Amino acid sequence: MKNISIITALVVSLFLISCGDKSQKHEDTKVEEVAQTPTESKEVETASSGLRDSMEDSRDLKGVGKFTEVTLAALDAGKAKKGEEVFVQNCSACHKMDKRFVGPALGGVTKKRSPEWILNMITNPELMVKEDPIAKALLKEYLAPMANQSITDDNALLILEYFRSYDSK
């Protein structure tokens, strides 16, 4: 009985020691608090609801990144074919066109997202997930951040052309 009391006291002591004084922080550790404004909450909520096909599309949102204005020319079948090759080589491990996989199905993406948003997501997914409400909602839904494949701007444009071609069928 005495041994049980000693063991219990030891366990409780170790627990209290391991918890430590929460007011003491290591100086090299930075804790960043992010306050979410009501507007940001509404944007994320709107983005989450916009993920479903039955909800409003988000083609007017451009995302965050260097692509701020993209003017699309007539569909180029040669570029679309090259874009399919780039897509298969770099993206198909996580994305399929017609079904959910690690990431969302991408068939129909040009009908839901603006060209700027698509290009920004392809070329800089880290920034998009950090700052764009739709990308944040996608991460929340799929639980896997999009890997940066270091796709060049030219190759991103080819992939976009492939998406346009696929979506025009």
Image: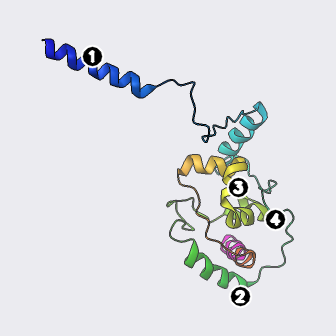
Query: Which residue is at the far left?
Result: 1
For disc 1, the marked residue is 9
Residue 146 disc label: none
Instruction: Please name whichever residue, 66 or 39, is drawn nearer the observer in this view of the structure.
Output: 66
Q: Dot 2 corresponds to which residue?
A: 78
- Residues under labels 3 and 2: Cα distance? 29 Å
The majority secondary structure of the magenta stretch comes to helix
| Nearer to me, 104 or 90 | 90
Q: Position of residue 105 (x, y in %)?
A: 57, 62
Q: Mark 4: which secondary structure?
A: loop
Q: What residue sits right under mark 4 in the picture?
A: 67
Q: Amino acid at mark 3?
A: Met
Q: Secondary structure at mark 2?
A: helix
Q: Secondary structure at mark 1?
A: helix
Residue drawn at 71 percent across, 88 percent down: 78
On the image, the x and y values in percent for residue 162 come to 68, 76
Q: Amino acid at mark 4?
A: Phe
Q: Earlier in the sequence, mark 3 or mark 1?
A: 1
Is tag 3's residue or tag 4's residue first in the polypeptide sequence?
A: 4
